Amino acid sequence: MFGQRKFLDINWNFDTTLFMEILSNSRHALKTGKKPSFKIKSEFWAIVIWWIAEKEIWFVVSKLGSFLTSWIDLKTAFSILAKQIKNPKLKQIIDDIRINLDHWLAISDTLKQHSKYFDPLIIALIEVWEKTWTLPRVLTELDKRLLETIELKAKIKWALIYPVILILITLIMVIFMMTFILPKITWAFQKTWVAMPALTQFMINISNFIMNNYILLIFGTIWFAIAFIIFKSTHIWKLALGKISLNLPVFGYIVKQWNVLLFIHSFSLLLDSWVLVLEALETTANVVGNIYYKKDIIRVKNEMETWVKLSNAMWLNVSNREIIFSNAYFPEDLVHMISIWEETWSIGKSMEKVWINYWKDLKRYISNLMTMLEPFIIVFVWALVWTIIIAIMLPFFNLAKVAKKM
């Protein structure tokens, strides 16, 4: 009925993408009695975006792990999960998994159809389980690591967003004072013919510019936001953002440590699940966020394909006389651990210790950074507000001087 090559990829391996599309369209035809329009359907679902939070993914992993360790079968486990989940998109994905299990389709095949919602690490680990039948152990370890990663990511986001929120609130307050309060006071003083101080006149000029060009400023902000959304998905933007984020004075350390933690977390989990090193590196490259880390991991993978040791591919050369290390993205102690693993084959325990130490260091660094940033932000906010207050109050002193002369 169907051409055989349609279900095979370029390497002649069975590809379930077309089969699942046919199955989905058949269900649609049974429900509605109409043949679906493939283009309109795909474009529509691309526009309708449901947000799935990381904690909801962790909830599914945690619950599924506890169900399977309690010897509940997969179909029953997914049926219970579908009733407990409130997110409509995630509920639909769980229902698809449960229905596809009846057609002997793997869980990973269903998750690959929704890869924009699921971390590549989760899909890879579940795919490994389907080959080794070790899902409960994998889910238990993934449950612990996911929760720690989510908590640390929340602290990193708060450390990066907290100063921006305070500055934005301050700017909104300043704009309000300059557009509603300052014009009324200056209008009252203009009738008295009192000379305006330089600071007050400067604030008046800014206020007049905002009042006269507010439509242009609003549309300019909207167009800037649209251009930013369109441009941020381009390769040039990812390169520029990756370079800037790595070289920031204070926050660059957070970006580097976070990507290193993602590498350790993904790579160690995959290797502990008996994934081949090259496949683990390829999956880890999709997990890390910064594009320069992605490129370096792919470079390491390509060098390993030419029979170069992993530690040497990460630019560690150990000789009798000296140790040469020149990798700008990964710390030297981590690469030394990998070098020891290549001799002892104990990467699981070594990586776990390194991950715990790096996780504690980054957590401590973020806490100290938040403590240090608060007084600087408070001083900046108060300086900006008091500058406007002084600019408003200065004409009153001039008015008092005029009154004394009279």
Image (cartoon, grey):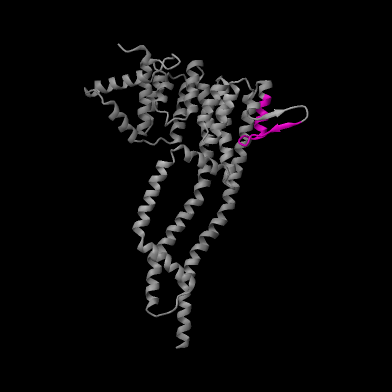
Q: Position of residue 91 (x, y in %)?
A: 36, 29
Residue at x-position 41% and y-position 17% = 15
Q: Quadrant of residue 406?
A: bottom left
* Residue 238 versus residue 175 in the image, above or below: above
**Numbered-mark total:** 0
Q: Position of residue 311 (x, y in %)?
A: 65, 27
Residue 28 belongs to the span the image colors magenta: no
Residue that extends furthest to the bottom in the rendered view of this protein: 406
Residue at x-position 47% and y-position 73% = 393
Residue at x-position 38% and y-position 45% = 226
Residue at x-position 51% and y-position 51% = 163
Residue that extends furthest to the right in the rendered view of this protein: 321
Between 168 and 364, the residue placed more toward the observer is 168
Q: Which residues are magenta?
A: 322-340
Between 29 and 56, the residue placed more toward the observer is 29
Q: Position of residue 324 (x, y in %)?
A: 71, 32
In the picture, which quadrant includes the N terminus? top left
Residue that extends furthest to the left in the rendered view of this protein: 33
* Residue 352 versus residue 229 in the image, above or below: above
Q: Is residue 280 left or right of residue 210?
A: right
Residue 334 belongs to the span the image colors magenta: yes
Q: Quadrant of residue 191?
A: bottom left
Q: Position of residue 286 (x, y in %)?
A: 50, 30
Q: Is residue 397 left or right of residue 17?
A: right
